[in-house]
Image (cartoon, grey):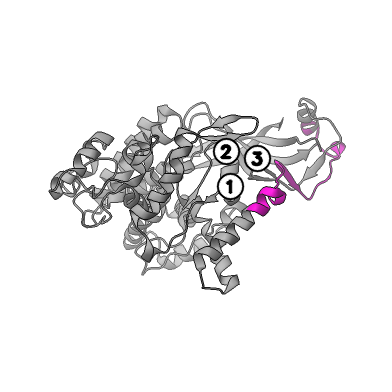
Amino acid sequence: MSHHIGNLPDHLRTHTSTIFLVALCKKKDFNHESLYGYIIEKLKPLESTGIAIPGHGIVKAGLVFVVGDNLGSHELGGFNENFSKAQYFCRYCCISRKQFESTYGYFYKSEERRAENYEAAIGQTHINTKKGIRFDSAFNALESFHVCEGGVPPCFGHDILEGFAAYDVALIIHFLDNKKWLTYEELQERTKSFNYSSIDKRDKPVEFLESYDRVRGGAWQIWTFIELLPLIMNNCINRNEPSWLLLLLLIEIIEILCSLTIHKDNLAYLHVLIVDYLKLRAELFPHVRLRPKHHYMLHYPELILTYGPLLKVWAMRFESKHSFFKNCIRSSTNFIKVLLSLSVRHELYQCFLRSGGDVRCEITIKKPVRFDLQLYSDSIQSAIAMSTLSLPVEHCASATVKGTVYKNGEAVVLRQEGYQCFVEVRRIRFLLYDNKEKLYVLVENLETDFVPHMRAYKLGSVLKYECLC
């Protein structure tokens, strides 16, 4: 188990160095009460009395939520862990499998789980009255936490990307191959030869084979493949094909879920997209049952109201921490008292980072050269003159600002007046650094046309230049 400090800014919480170790335990020795009970004993004083911090006085802290995959969240919350056969499989509502698998059951959401009906179910003895709750979670003993009051958020990386989306997209590809849109060999060749951006190259998708029943790869590799599939297939597209519309619905849903900011007004639209997707999926592939993870997605709009953008509460970033322990045990080749060795090594490493080994600049530039304004056109000179930029400055090939990498030639979405309305796309022409911790970006304002059947923007000619800070 690991933990984050929720008060940290988003760009710092993405660093694995800000993920702190709570406990390590062998799977065969795991016991809910003994392990979690010990952690609860340490958390209770933080809630009630707090700790004294010089310059700040007494500061209290509380557990907000615990992220994890479905199996981990259900184990921690005391819910059923058998998703394929259990009568009650949802930790957000009391829907039964019979209701879910009935006609139009994919629309159905049952009574919302609350602390009251959770505690009432614990005292029951019959399986149907327990509503999928096996025992009372140890974490419910905390004042600030309850598993049914926002305690266990979803992870759409496990639910969608590595979950049902990987299987549903495979169904779509097999269906399109049967209709002679595109052969598997053509898809493999196009995937291999596609001109990926520098960002997408980091998570280049795995080639899809005829024998696959799901899209292979990690969560972000799967998303890269799904997102770029309309561009990869390009001239093979039939705009009115229902299976293609199903893919476009899935892409739009994931695009919204991957957003770092989501307006409340868009949540009703997200709900409509999800319902449309589930309805079309059930109609196109009635021989393949919907999975419990399809149902979980139905709760996402209301869960976004609780947690904010779900990308900020998914479990995938914590899984990146596993690489430290894997590398540590491989390099040490010591399997005596493994948990002690890993814990000590991790804390020594964290001590090194906190003592200054992880100091980062907010802005990092690469390959800077002196920028000579006189070499460029009057329109570029005019755009720079209208900005607050003071010469001399350096022109750099790329810059990293709070963890986000910007490169010359890449397109960025600057603003939009509404969801997909009057979207302004800019292409980075120059990255200019003034050596005063300020980065200026000279961008080309481009004509923009949204292409709905590809869920992409077609960029046209340059309208004007702007210099942004």
Question: In the rendered structure, does residue 366 fall within the stretch colored magenta?
Answer: yes
Please tell me in which quadrant of the rendered image residue 271 appears: top left
Left or right of 466 in this view: 133: left
Left or right of 209 in this view: 324: right
Residue 40 at x, y percent in the picture: 41, 45
Residue 258 visible in the snapshot = no
Please tell me in which quadrant of the rendered image residue 468 appears: top right
Q: Residue at x 33, y 43 (%)?
A: 297
Quickly name the residue at label 2: 8
Q: CA distance from mark 1 to mark 2?
A: 9 Å
Q: Looking at the rendered structure, which numbered label has been put on residue 18?
A: 1
Q: Residue at x 20, y 38 (%)?
A: 120
Q: Residue at x 34, y 52 (%)?
A: 33
Question: In the rendered structure, does residue 111 fall within the stretch colored magenta?
Answer: no
Image depth: mark 1 or mark 3 in front: 1
Q: CA distance from mark 1 to mark 3?
A: 33 Å
Looking at the rendered structure, the kind of residue marked 1 is Thr
Looking at the rendered structure, the kind of residue marked 3 is Arg
Q: CA distance from mark 2 to mark 3?
A: 31 Å
Element type where label 1 sits in the image = helix
Quickly name the residue at label 3: 427
Q: Residue at x 34, y 64 (%)?
A: 213
Left or right of 100 in this view: 168: right
Callout 1–callout 2 Cβ contact below 8 Å: yes
Q: Earlier in the sequence, mark 2 or mark 3?
A: 2
Q: What range of the chain is rendered magenta?
A: 351-380
Q: Is residue 74 above or below residue 342?
A: above
Residue 431 at x, y percent in the picture: 74, 41
Looking at the rendered structure, the kind of residue marked 2 is Leu
Q: Quarter holding the C terminus?
A: top right
Residue 411 at x, y percent in the picture: 62, 42
Q: Earlier in the sequence, mark 1 or mark 3?
A: 1
